[in-house]
């Protein structure tokens, strides 16, 4: 584990990408460059180390202390060991009701999103199981690179402490979102499709709500028009993939309305505010479910004789938000808790948990914890470098093309060609000139198109893959009046491909995402219910190279930054690299006529002529 316990650089940051450290190769390339960081564990644990017998029941359980340290050093399990945890926990949770009864004292935790090293901090802040219980509100996976570690460790703890650790389902605990975001890819990279399918089965056994001391209703998302009494929760069929509407959907996806508690006041989005008596509005930010108003929350609490609602689902700058108090009991009607600090290495937020003990509520905040670095999409360094190498190769080809064209036009061939040219009759000279010029123009045009298409391919590989993996500052946020359909494209305009939303392009991040609000606005599309068919074959994967975006052909001062053939081709070729609207034809004609010298029949280009 990295040496620093607290590190604001957060997830997926690299000192090399930020320019703080100059990379230097060690004298011996077989040695580790950073020796104070221990290497990842290369082998799974032995069965005799993994399995321990419960002293009270005699049942085999996973060794949680070994698992904790094993995962901290990026170790993995065998498939049989991982399946043991998943299947045993699924069987246990399947017997639990839809709504759990949780006694105090309890520590309530919000979204984790694959931030395993911050999960360890939660248990430090929250205390031991002998001191209190734990209730997690869901969203253990996706968007972080240690989701499977979070899930397996929490499940292992659940096997040991079934009456002290309580796990609820979040909106990301489903096949639809894990296929669309990162969890499936992580499972396939670290384990197998068998493990992923076992995870999906376990998600369908997770309870969907909890009640603390009969006073606090706990859920991942929020309440619903279909939720009149608590018995309605018990009547839900949770053993399924959530639909895009209905009570199960609302429990996982609903949000307090913007300006909750003061929604009747005018805002830029709602110049006339929300009319009195309105309880629900379509949740355009999510593309499904509802916004519930302060009045709806108060009526739900009064109907069921509850004190407040604890929920997660939304990133919070301070790690939590206490919403407006109820008029009768003078207690916050809703408390939103978020436990993933410095979310996505861009939000600059703190994490927080709720500690409820002796009828007192305490909010404990904490900062992000340092952790190992992963390349985007779980790539190896060779794959990650391919777009950069390919782009450099095409730049070399373009440079050669730029030089060779004029050399080819201005130089003469060998002596035999010259003698043949001098012996030609004047009547044939004009015809040969026209034919040679046409041939040269066509050859140059073919070179420009071929190399330009190659350049475009690598440009798209690099730029679009970066855009899909970053929080795009230029993203246009849909207004509240927009339709409720899911997004048609993701940050950067990459159309309907599974986003990685993990690494953030370093240059763009430093320039544009400087605060929680910046990151929240940039990430708004990723909060929506995605509209896609995960049964279709995925497109060819694009390789992310966040620190190697191509420079713009036009400089910041408006002058030509790359006034050469490469820049011209980049600007003129369209997305397909085919319909150039005659620009390549004109460019070829311009190059062919660039040097007014006696023309000759073209000869094959020799290697020494390119020097």
Image (tube, rainbow, N blue to C red):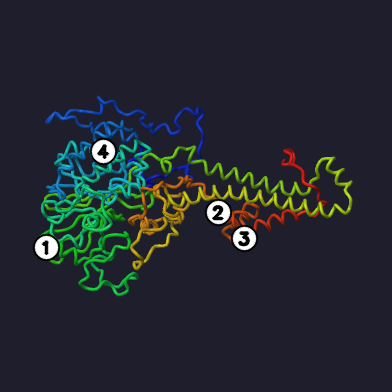
Q: What whole-number distance in Å separates the C-alpha atoms at marks 4 and 3? A: 59 Å
Image quadrant where one finds the N terminus: top left
Does 258 appear above or below 112? below
Say the numbered circle drawn on residue 576. 2
Q: Secondary structure at mark 4?
A: helix
Which picture quadrant has residue 370?
Answer: top left
Q: CA distance from mark 1 to mark 3?
A: 68 Å
Which of the two discs, 4 and 1, labels the residue nearer the N terminus?
4
Q: Residue beneath label 4, please?
A: 153
For discs 4 and 3, the disc positioned in front in the rendered view: 3
Q: Residue at x 46, y 33 (%)?
A: 33
> Can you identify the residue that label 1 sits on?
303
Pick the residue in front: 538 or 563.
538
Dot 2: what SS? loop
Q: What is the spatial separation of the Cα atoms under label 2 and label 4, in whole angstroms? A: 47 Å
Q: Which residue is the site of mark 3?
A: 581
Residue 369, position in %: x, y?
A: 33, 43
Disc nearest the viewer among 2 and 4 = 2
């Amino acid at each position: 584990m990295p040496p620093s316990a607290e590190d604001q650089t957060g997830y997926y940051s690299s000192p090399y990408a930020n320019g703080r450290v100059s990379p230097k190769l060690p004298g011996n390339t077989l040695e580790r460059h950073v020796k104070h960081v221990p290497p990842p564990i290369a082998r799974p644990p032995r069965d005799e180390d993994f399995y321990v017998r419960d002293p009270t029941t005699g049942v085999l359980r996973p060794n949680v202390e070994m698992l904790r340290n094993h995962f901290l050093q990026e170790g993995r399990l065998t498939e049989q060991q991982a399946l043991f945890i998943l299947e045993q926990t699924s069987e246990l949770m399947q017997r639990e009701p839809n709504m759990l009864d949780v006694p105090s004292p309890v520590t309530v935790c919000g979204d984790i999103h694959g931030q395993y090293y911050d999960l360890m901090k939660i248990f430090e802040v929250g205390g031991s199981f002998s001191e209190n219980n734990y209730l997690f509100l869901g969203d253990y996976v996706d968007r972080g690179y240690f989701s499977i570690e979070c899930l397996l460790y929490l499940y292992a703890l659940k096997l040991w402490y079934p009456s002290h650790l309580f796990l609820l389902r979040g909106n990301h605990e489903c096949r639809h979102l894990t296929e669309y975001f990162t969890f499936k890819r992580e499972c396939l990279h670290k384990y197998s499709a068998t493990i992923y399918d076992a995870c999906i089965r376990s998600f369908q056994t997770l309870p969907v709500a909890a009640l603390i001391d009969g006073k606090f209703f706990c859920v991942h998302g929020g309440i619903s028009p279909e939720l009149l009494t608590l018995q309605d929760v018990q009547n839900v069929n949770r053993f399924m993939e959530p639909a895009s509407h209905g009570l199960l959907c609302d429990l996982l996806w609903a949000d307090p309305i913007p300006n909750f508690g003061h929604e009747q006041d005018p805002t830029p989005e709602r110049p006339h505010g929300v009319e009195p008596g309105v309880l629900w509005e379509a949740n355009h930010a999510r593309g499904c479910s509802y916004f519930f108003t302060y009045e709806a929350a108060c009526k739900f609490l009064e109907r069921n004789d509850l004190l407040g609602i604890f929920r997660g689902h939304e990133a919070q700058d301070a790690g939590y938000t206490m919403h407006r108090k109820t008029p009768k009991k003078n207690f916050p009607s809703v408390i939103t808790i978020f436990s993933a600090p410095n979310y996505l290495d861009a939000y600059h937020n703190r994490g927080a948990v709720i500690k409820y003990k002796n009828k007192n509520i305490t909010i404990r905040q904490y900062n992000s914890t340092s952790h190992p670095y992963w390349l985007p999409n779980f790539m190896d360094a060779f794959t990650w470098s391919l777009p950069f190498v390919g782009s450099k190769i095409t730049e070399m080809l373009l440079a050669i093309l730029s030089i060779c064209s004029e050399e080819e036009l201005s130089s003469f061939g060998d002596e035999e060609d010259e003698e043949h040219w001098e012996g030609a009759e004047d009547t044939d000279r004009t015809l040969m000139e026209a034919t040679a010029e046409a041939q040269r123009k066509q050859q140059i045009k073919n070179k420009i198109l071929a190399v330009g298409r190659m350049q475009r391919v690598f440009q798209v590989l690099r730029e679009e893959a970066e855009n899909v993996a970053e929080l795009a500052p230029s993203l246009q946020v849909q207004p509240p009046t927009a339709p409720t359909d899911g997004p048609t494209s993701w940050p950067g305009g990459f159309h309907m491909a599974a986003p990685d939303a993990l690494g953030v392009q370093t240059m763009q991040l430093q320039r544009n995402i400087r605060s929680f609000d910046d990151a929240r606005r940039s990430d708004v599309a990723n909060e929506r219910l995605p509209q896609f068919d995960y049964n279709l074959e995925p497109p060819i994967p694009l390789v992310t190279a966040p620190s190697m975006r191509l420079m713009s052909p036009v400089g910041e001062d408006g002058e030509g930054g790359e006034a050469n053939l490469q820049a011209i081709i980049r600007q003129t070729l369209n997305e397909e690299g085919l319909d150039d609207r005659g620009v390549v034809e004109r460019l070829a004609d311009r190059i062919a006529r660039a040097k007014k010298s006696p023309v000759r029949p073209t000869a094959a280009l020799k290697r020494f002529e390119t020097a």
